[in-house]
Amino acid sequence: MVAINYSFTEIIDERKEWMYHDGIEFYTHLYISVQQPPKATVLIVHDICEHVNRYDALAKAFARSDIQVLGFDQRGFGHTGKRNGHMGDNGGVAAVTRDIAFMSRQVSIPGIPHFLFGHSGGGTYVLNYCSNHNSDGHVSGVIASAPALTMGKMLFPSGISAAGWAKRLMAKISPHSRTYNKLTPEMLTDNKQELEKLATSKYMMNWCTASTLVSMVDMGKAVRRHARSFRTPVLVIIGDSDVATPCEGVREFIFHMPSDSDREYVELINCKYHEIDFQDNLDIDPIEKYVDWIISRTPAPTI
């Protein structure tokens, strides 16, 4: 197991840059690994309604463990959304898939294992990417934190369920209309420091467009439906009482994966929080688990 010293004060070399792709200027944040060349590279894909700098602690833990990291703000969210407009709309699954492919090329290094990490909706996007676009194995593994393979009723406007027809009608008639979720900060984490950041951040949102929400619901269903052919090594971690993304969808996905696949599923008992990476009262340290999982899938050092 890799020991991560969170009080470690060595400064990580970081680069914040704008990258132009597909007609959009993307905000990106690169964390240079302490060791060069790195043992692995990782692309972080954040959830909708948030921004990638929320993953700063995770990215620095990776970098201090010799894993180079790139994160980016999705279309319609964070710095990218504010610069380009169309707030709350990431362009749908096809657009996000192109963005993941492009950003992966920016951080990948020939001969070095490359991994994807995604949380919630970001977790579903990276699973979907590996399900459909990793036949050549260029992604060595994928980590999904509380992936939105199913969505709780708290993510939908009053009177609209995940399975209801009303949301599809809304997306068809008014695709850019706002759909507000009913999640409270306390459903995400009880980390007081993080709650303070949530309350003051100008990049956090409690809404997305109807078309973005509907495309995510359909994507979650597709990932579950194609589980039997999923071959990318995968680690999934989720709380058993998560109200934002109930674990039943994850259980279905893991259960139907090939029996000989490289898969690990961690279900945190009596955990209601959606953003488990910010919790310090769990039986495991999620960030340390992510690091260990990646390092165990990199080549052993030569003597």
Image (cartoon, rainbow, N blue to C red):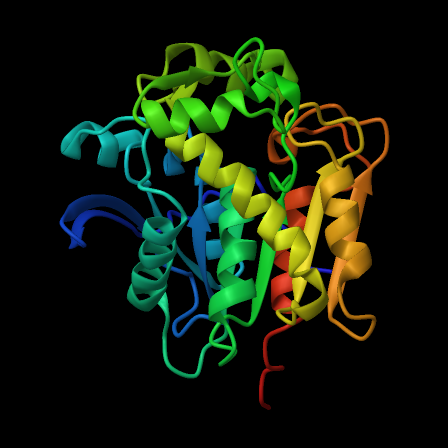
Q: How many marks?
A: 0
User: Residue 72: x, y in percent?
Assistant: 33, 46
289 or 214, nearer to the observer = 214
User: Residue 141: x, y in percent?
Assistant: 58, 66
Residue at image location 59% in from the left, 45% down from the top: 220
Q: Does residue 302 lie above or below 174 as drawn? A: below
Quarter where residue 142 is shown: bottom right
User: Residue 144: x, y in percent?
Assistant: 61, 49
Residue extending furthest toward the bottom: 303
Residue at image location 55% in from the left, 25% down from the top: 165
Residue at image location 47% in from the left, 34% down from the top: 214
- Quadrant of the frame with the N terminus: bottom right
Residue at image location 67% in from the left, 52% down from the top: 224
- Quadrant of the frame with the C terminus: bottom right
Q: Visible in this render: residue 123?
A: no
Q: Does residue 168 lie above or below 292 as drawn? A: above
User: Residue 120: x, y in percent?
Assistant: 56, 38
Q: Does residue 183 lie above or below 261 as drawn? A: above
Q: Does residue 156 lie above or below 255 as drawn? A: above
Q: Visible in this render: residue 130?
A: yes
